[in-house]
Every structure is written in structure tokens, then in C-alpha cells.
Amino acid sequence: MSRIAASAFDIGTVYMTQNGKRDERLTPYVWKSADFGKTWTSIAANIPVGPVNVIREDPVNKDILYVGTDTGVYVTTDGGKAWQTIGTNLPADTCTTWSSTRATT
């Protein structure tokens, strides 16, 4: 396990990422539980092969999630059904932490 993050929107929802590089497993592991961790569903979908280090929920929209991997940062706007790279001109680099804040006006 590389990271666990509780949802700020749903009391029973939690997200977990696993980093398999210690076991030489490069499958992306991203999991969601909506029942306080009793059962888990993969939401890794189309994240490219490689270790996943961190997951964060958007502070405004529960369907927007961010993951940091050994090759970059990815975002989903549909709760993990499909993921896209953040920024096409950013260099590929390891992301192990993520901080998100809500913009204020």
C-alpha cells in the first residue's frame, strides 16, 4: 500500500493506491471502497503501467480524482472510469505527494 485517502464527501468511502515496485509488479493499483473498507473495487481503468504512489480527491467535486505515479500525474472526472494525463507538455517524473486546495475569491 502506498496511500490511503478518506473521502471528504462520503463517510464510508476511502481510496487506496498500491505500489508494486518492491515486488516487481508494475500494474497500476487504485482501489475504492464505499463500505468502510469491507470490499474494494479497482478504479485503475486506463492508467498506464507503473507504480501508483498517491491519490487525492478534488476538494469541490467527488468525481474528480488525481493520482501520482512514477511517470506523471493523471486525473479522472468520472470517479475512475477513465483517466487522462495532466498537461501534455510536462516532463514525465515521479509524483509521490499531492496537495490540493480550494480556490477562494
Image (tube, rainbow, N blue to C red):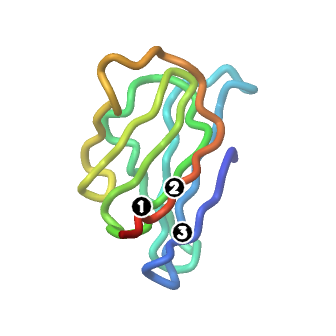
Q: Quadrant of residue 38?
A: bottom right
- Numbered tag placed on residue 100 in the rendering: 2
Q: Is residue 73 left or right of residue 70?
A: left
Q: CA distance from mark 2 to mark 3?
A: 17 Å
Residue holding disc 3:
14
The residue located at (49%, 47%) in the rendering is 30
N-term mark: 1 or 2: 1
- Numbered tag placed on residue 28 in the rendering: none
N-term mark: 1 or 3: 3
Q: Secondary structure at mark 3?
A: strand
Q: Position of residue 44 (x, y in %)?
A: 40, 43
Identity of the amino acid at label 3? Val
Identity of the amino acid at label 2? Ser
Identity of the amino acid at label 1? Asp
Say which of marks 1 and 2 sits in front: 2
The residue located at (57%, 79%) in the rendering is 36
Say which of marks 2 and 3 sits in front: 2
Which of 68/99 is in front?
99
Q: CA distance from mark 1 to mark 3?
A: 13 Å
Q: Position of residue 73 (x, y in %)?
A: 45, 33
N-term mark: 2 or 3: 3
Q: Secondary structure at mark 1?
A: loop
Residue holding disc 1:
58
- Callout 2: 10 Å neighbours few (<14), some, many (20+)? few
